């Protein structure tokens, strides 16, 4: 078990190192002089030169990569070129907004997807099942920015049910979270449906019925508990993805989250912030992977003895 | 009044032109405390018949198109879901073929047995009773087993847990659907012995579904042989095994290996069981029957009573019964 965990930790570190190197190389491949971005178009050559020296921009790329990795190893994500705020601080101050938005969205879509998935599996092939399938396909294919804009226009601007944009309280999160929930609910409803269909045909579900268990207990206790085992993996990845920044939704609703930060930094060619947000997402994904590994032993007792 | 009486049961899968009748006019009865064996190859409809007793065949796809299943005089097919829940695992308990797959992998076995108690004997839903049940089915050190997950037990132990779960409600009828098929041969004998002991000890009726004639003689009072959705022969176990009247039963008995008989090669029944929905016309067994006559392919035989408690679905049974030593068991 300890060996397994050690192994996983090693490969997690390798993944993060790879991500760091790759983002560094990609960002440096982007055309444009960072010094010009920082100092502005009218800056004198002396100022540009000074900036180059300050940020080691004249040195060879392998050397700069070395500085970058060394800083990362010391937990230093650098400072924003634009605001001079430490990148770690910029991310952490925006994390609560993104976390609140993501949590609310996950609660909303799981509350919808679980009953939809279970009931469509139970009444497979019915008009209800087919209707949910069509809606799920729709939910899967809608582009985030379009759905966000449409909901914002109709429900906030036209109907006045929700605040249009900005973040001054819980009510400002409702529509963005609803948008995210609509985007994810279809996928999860189908995922739970297919797992549940398989589980409902299993001998232990028949055995539960043969015991005299009420149908709700058969479905939600005996069935769902087993059907959720594979869903947890995917959910953990999506949680990591959401916390890493919900780009479109946050931008449309002008929420000061990590997604907005990431998009701004790209527009500003604010290299440390770009790399910082990418690294932050990578850490989340790696952490989610590790967490699933540990969590699995708890939700699936068969794993423990196999490990 | 018999404990269980099945009258002309008909179960179909699919509908319209594609409907396939998996169980076609099965009638059986079982007295309290007696054991009936339902024998047949895979696809003969024996499991569907057994599951129908507590209306456990999922519908759709199955449809109960006709007949009655009376338990203590009440028709199961007309029961509400509330009444069905009381019957399931209450009056009628089930033990299934694959114990490993029939126990829920994510719950501890103690909790799974307690669940049965909760539904049918809520006052006894405690660890003490679970331990008593585990002891009853011969699980050593039951106290330490309560918190085990199913995968931590061997196949034989898993089946004992299934039996303990089935006994939790003190059922009047135990339906065992191929309870030993998935187990090692040595374990099979133990489980059959256990079922025999429990039946005597608890006085419950047992409906044993099997394709293995070898275990029938040890346990059954009566035996019914099914082929292609129909009963082809029914009678007291000794008579059927010693003097089988239907050519199919004769062939089945001849294909059971026997240590004492000097047979070089086991007799197999030629051909395969017809697929559901494509049963041959006339007698359903005639394409594989060594004694088939021209008339067998056109006239569907009735299940006729040949004497009290003895039924056979073959009009030629009398002429077929040349003095032969078919059985070496029973």
Image (cartoon, coloured by chain):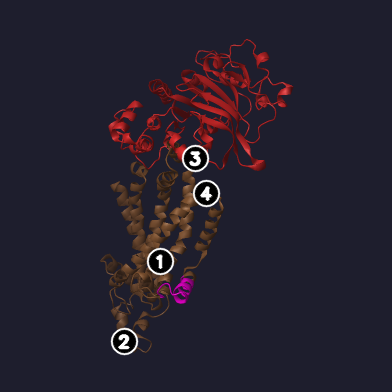
Residue furthest left in the image: A74
The residue pinned by badge 1 equals A177
* Dot 3: chain letter: B
What chain is the brown one?
A
On the image, the x and y values in percent for residue B79 come to: 50, 37
Bounds of the magenta segment:
A148-164
Q: Say which element carries label 3.
A: loop
Say which colour chain B has.
red
* Dot 4: chain letter: A
Query: Looking at this view, is A182 or B78 the one in front?
Result: B78
* Mark 2 and mark 3: Cα distance apart in space: 86 Å
Q: Residues within 10 Å of mark 1 (few under 14, many from 20)?
A: many
Q: Is residue A152 magenta?
A: yes
Q: Is residue B48 magenta?
A: no
On the image, the x and y values in percent for residue B289 come to: 66, 23
User: Where residue B80 is drawn, which disc sits there?
Assistant: 3
The residue lying at 50 percent from left, 15 percent from top is: B259
User: Where residue B228 is drawn, which disc sits there?
Assistant: none
Please report contact status of discs 2 and 1: CB closer than 8 Å, yes or no.
no
Mark 4 vs mark 1, foreground winner is: 4
* Mark 2 and mark 4: Cα distance apart in space: 70 Å
Sequence-wise first label, 2 or 4 = 2
Sequence-wise first label, 4 or 1 = 4
The residue pinned by badge 2 equals A47
The residue pinned by badge 4 equals A123
* Dot 2: chain letter: A
Q: Say which element carries label 2.
A: helix
* Mark 2 and mark 1: Cα distance apart in space: 45 Å
């Amino acid at each position: 078990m300890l060996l397994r965990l050690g192994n996983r930790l090693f490969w997690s570190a390798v993944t993060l190192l790879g991500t760091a190197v790759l983002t560094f190389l990609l960002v440096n491949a982007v055309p444009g002089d960072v010094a010009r971005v920082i100092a502005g178009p009218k800056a004198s050559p002396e100022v540009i030169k000074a900036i180059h020296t300050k940020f080691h921009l004249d040195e060879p790329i392998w050397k700069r990569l070395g500085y970058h990795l060394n800083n990362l190893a010391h937990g230093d994500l650098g400072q924003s070129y634009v605001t001079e705020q430490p990148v770690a601080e910029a991310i952490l101050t925006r994390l609560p907004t993104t976390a609140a938005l993501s949590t609310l969205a996950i609660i909303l879509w799981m509350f919808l997807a679980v009953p939809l998935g279970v009931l469509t599996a139970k009444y497979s092939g019915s008009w209800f099942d087919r209707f949910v399938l069509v809606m799920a396909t729709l939910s899967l294919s809608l582009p985030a920015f379009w759905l966000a804009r449409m909901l914002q226009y109709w429900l906030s601007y036209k109907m006045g049910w929700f605040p249009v944009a900005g973040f001054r309280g819980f009510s400002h999160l409702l529509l963005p979270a609803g948008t995210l929930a609509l985007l994810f609910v279809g996928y999860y409803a189908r995922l739970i449906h297919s797992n549940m269909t398989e589980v409902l045909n299993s001998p232990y579900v028949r055995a539960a019925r043969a015991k005299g268990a009420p149908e709700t207990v058969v479905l939600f206790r005996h069935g769902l508990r087993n059907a959720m085992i594979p869903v947890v993996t995917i959910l953990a990845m999506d949680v990591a993805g959401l916390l890493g920044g919900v780009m479109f939704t946050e931008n449309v609703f002008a929420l000061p989250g990590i997604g907005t930060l990431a998009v701004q930094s790209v527009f500003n060619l604010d290299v440390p912030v770009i790399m910082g947000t990418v690294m932050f997402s990578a850490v989340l994904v790696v952490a989610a992977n590790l967490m699933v590994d540990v969590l699995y032993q708890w939700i699936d007792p068969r794993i423990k003895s196999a490990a | 009044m018999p404990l269980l009486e099945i009258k002309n049961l008909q179960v179909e899968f699919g509908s319209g032109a594609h409907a396939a009748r998996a169980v076609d006019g099965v009638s059986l009865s079982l007295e309290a405390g007696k054991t009936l064996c339902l024998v047949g190859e895979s696809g003969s409809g024996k499991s569907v018949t057994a599951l129908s007793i507590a209306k456990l065949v999922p519908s759709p796809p199955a449809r109960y198109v006709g007949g009655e299943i009376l338990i203590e005089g009440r028709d199961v097919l007309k029961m509400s879901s509330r009444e069905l829940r009381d019957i399931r695992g209450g009056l009628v308990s089930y033990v299934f073929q694959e114990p490993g797959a029939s126990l829920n992998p994510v719950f501890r076995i103690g909790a799974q047995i307690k669940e049965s108690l909760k539904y049918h004997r809520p006052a006894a839903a405690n660890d003490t009773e679970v331990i008593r049940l585990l002891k009853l089915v011969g699980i050593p050190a039951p106290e330490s087993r309560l918190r085990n997950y199913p995968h931590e037990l061997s196949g034989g132990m898993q089946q004992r847990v299934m039996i303990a779960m089935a006994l939790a409600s003190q059922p009047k009828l135990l339906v065992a659907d191929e309870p030993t098929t998935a187990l090692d041969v040595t374990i099979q004998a133990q489980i059959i012995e256990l079922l025999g002991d429990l039946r005597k000890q608890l006085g419950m009726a047992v409906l044993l579904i099997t394709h293995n004639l070898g275990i029938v003689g040890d346990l059954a009072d009566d035996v019914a042989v099914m082929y292609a959705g129909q009963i082809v022969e029914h009678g007291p176990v000794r008579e059927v095994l010693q003097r089988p009247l239907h050519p199919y039963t004769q062939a089945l008995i001849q294909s059971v290996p026997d240590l004492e008989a000097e047979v070089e090669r086991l007799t197999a029944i030629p051909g395969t069981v017809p697929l559901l929905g494509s049963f041959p016309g006339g007698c359903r067994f005639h394409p594989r029957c060594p004694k088939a006559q021209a008339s067998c392919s056109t006239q569907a035989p009735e299940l006729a009573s040949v004497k009290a408690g003895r039924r056979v679905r073959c009009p030629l049974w009398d002429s077929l019964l040349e003095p032969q030593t078919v059985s070496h068991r029973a």
